Image (tube, rainbow, N blue to C red):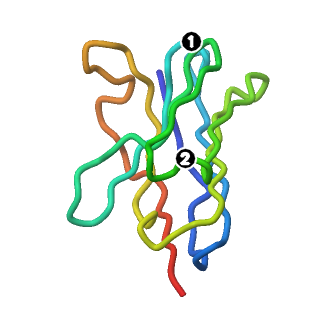
Amino acid sequence: QLQLVESGGGLVQPGGSLRLSCAASGFTLDYYPIGWFRQAPGKQRELVAAITSGGSTNYADSVKGRFTISRNNAKNTMYLQMNSLKAEDTAVYYCNADLGKGRYLRDHWGQGTQVTVSS
């Protein structure tokens, strides 16, 4: 069974840092383009960072220079290092893989991991 599980969220002050993890099972994580998404209260889910099979990365303008996406192939795990966090980064964060044609590896996005940036 293909599975992705997010972890690492929590409460952090503005300017602080968190590292999120996305553990994959049932497939090789670097086979598909894979990324981190987030959904804030009252807003639609958005892509914040992605990494391709070849290692190319892309970031939403709002997180460029602050977030870094990476993966550890030996652990089959993807990470999102989040620095200089802002209140507007508060959201539920999810990971998913892009199969193309608007389809994702996870048909159901699950619960994600909550990131709250607040004083």
Q: Amino acid at mark 2?
A: Lys
- How far apart are the two marked residues, 1 and 2, measured between alpha carbons? 24 Å
Q: Residues within 10 Å of mark 1 (few under 14, many from 20)?
A: few
Q: In the rendering, at what x and y percent does residue 74 appear?
A: 79, 23
In the rendered image, the vertical position of residue 96 relative to residue 28, given as above or below? below
Label 1 vs 2, first from the N-terminus: 1
In the rendered image, the vertical position of residue 19 relative to residue 10, given as above or below? above
Q: Residues within 10 Å of mark 2 (few under 14, many from 20)?
A: few
Q: Are marks 1 and 2 in contact (CB under 8 Å)?
A: no
Q: Residue furthest right?
A: 74
Q: Is residue 44 left or right of residue 53?
A: left
Q: Quadrant of residue 71?
A: top right
Front-most of 86 and 1? 86
Q: Is residue 45 left or right of residue 119?
A: left
Q: Amino acid at mark 1?
A: Tyr
Q: How many marks?
A: 2
Provide the secondary structure element on which disc 1 rests.
helix
User: Residue, x 29% and y 47% (percent of image)?
Assistant: 45
User: Residue, x 29% and y 29% (percent of image)?
Assistant: 107
Q: In the rendering, at what x and y percent does residue 116 appear?
A: 49, 72
In the rendered image, the vertical position of residue 32 relative to residue 81, given as above or below? above
Q: Kindly report which numbered mark, 1 or 2, lies closer to the viewer in this rendering.
A: 2
Q: Quadrant of residue 84?
A: bottom right
Quadrant position of the C terminus in the picture: bottom right
Front-most of 105 and 16? 16
Q: Which residue is mark 1?
A: 31
Q: Which mark is residue 56?
A: none
User: Residue, x 30% and y 36% (percent of image)?
Assistant: 108
Q: Which residue is mark 2?
A: 64
Provide the secondary structure element on which disc 2 rests.
loop
Q: In the rendering, at what x and y percent does residue 113 appear?
A: 48, 56
Q: Quadrant of residue 68?
A: top right
